[in-house]
Image (spheres, rainbow, N blue to C red):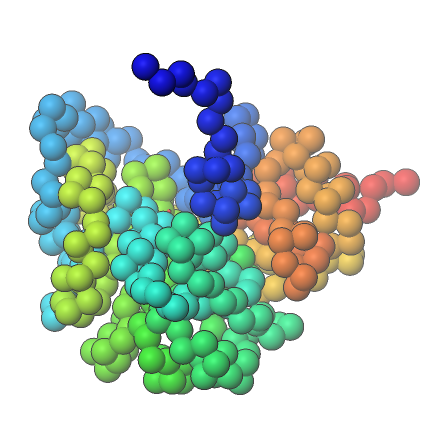
Amino acid sequence: MRAMPNSYDPDQIIRPEILALSAYHVPSATGMIKLDAMENPYPLPPALRDEIAQLTADAQINRYPDASAAALKASLREALMIPAEMEIMLGNGSDEIIQIIAMATARPGAVLMSVEPAFVMFRMIATFANIKYVGVPLSADFSLDLEAMLAAIGKYQPTVIFLAYPNNPTGNLFDAEAIARIIEATPGIVIVDEAYHIFADASLVDKLAQYPNLLLMRTLSKLGLAGLRLGLLIGRPEWLIQLEKLRLPYNVGIITQLVAQAVLDHLDVLLEQAAAIKTERAIMSRHLTALEGVEVFPSNANFILFRVNGADRIFLELKQQGILIKNLDGTHPSLTNCLRATVGTPGENAQFYKALQTIISPAV
Ligand code: PMP
């Protein structure tokens, strides 16, 4: 028998571009006021929670889930008013849908394009799927730099472009006309990621019929169901038939299917919560603007990006006081000294403003 070596070297086995990656870091938030991950801070009403308890108690978890999730898809169609001629594909979160699209389009020489700064998983997943990534910088005010985008499209001929509408981490909506120009100019597909759609009062869903290379992504995460992990892709059957081939058969579990469907039957609850978050967003924006030395960026999402003097110190001091937000300093040159706070409950937000105020202008 051949002697086994004492150790195997991951450097010799794992792809170099994976070795070079840093893992997506999710900080522990136990016991903290959690304003870091764009979650909806409100629980579901007790009656709906009881209904969910009963549904999960009765769920046949010894069986595989419905691989086509037909009942859930019908609920989603109705709740999200998805055009009848469009297909939908479900993902274990929209993260998984990004991954499916990247895997499907990673032909030799293919390019996945997005803007910078954008949702970091666009770039990371391109690397996972071994597809070249090109990030085109936004303008200084975080709007789309249409000229730069059109030049990059001409140069790289991207296979797929991801644009979040509204964008994360900047919170703004790009100009819909500029997005239309990009869709028309590119030889590939454009995925408009509407994760924050509920807070934006804007959507490109009506453009699906017009543009054969447009697909739309949504998620239930920001609506209040982040723990369930359910995202969806909406688009023409000719694209979704191909992408479905990469979806693992049982990617959406039975509990997710049952619970999402039950909650969608009470969509009014989620819509009321979203309305409350939008009201609080305006209040948060006013509070942050009133602080000395703070620059606040306009938001159409459930979070606010703002610039301070000394982001690292402020982030750490907030953390020491039990308030977790997101420090974006150092993640991109245009985000120097930028922090991002998710809109929480009025009580959580009030504690955040109070702590931030004392850190920024301590009483003498
Ligand atoms: N798209 C954007 C723009 C996001 O900000 C996020 C999460 N932060 C996602 C997609 C992923 O959402 P999920 O996987 O929870 O559906």
In the rendered image, residue 207, in percent from the top left (x then y), is placed at: 27, 77
In the rendered image, residue 148, in percent from the top left (x then y), is placed at: 54, 80
Task: Locate residue 39 relative to residue 243 in the image: left or right.
Answer: right
Q: As rendered, which of 336 and 84 lies closer to the eye?
A: 336
Give the residue displayed 23% in from the left and 78% down from the top. 212
Give the residue displayed 23% in from the left and 63% down from the top. 234
Give the residue displayed 37% in from the left and 80% down from the top. 186
Q: How many marks?
A: 0
Task: Locate residue 286 relative to residue 185 in the image: left or right.
Answer: right
Q: Quadrant of residue 295?
A: bottom right
Residue 197 visible in image? no
Give the residue displayed 9% in from the left and 28% down from the top. 63
Q: As rendered, which of 66 and 317 lies closer to the eye?
A: 66
Task: Locate residue 105 relative to residue 235 in the image: left or right.
Answer: right
In the rendered image, residue 323, in percent from the top left (x then y), is placed at: 61, 36
Note whether 2 is above or below 124 in the view shown.
above
Q: Quadrant of residue 79?
A: bottom left
In the rendered image, residue 183, in percent from the top left (x then y), is placed at: 35, 79
Task: Locate residue 293 relative to residue 152 in the image: left or right.
Answer: right
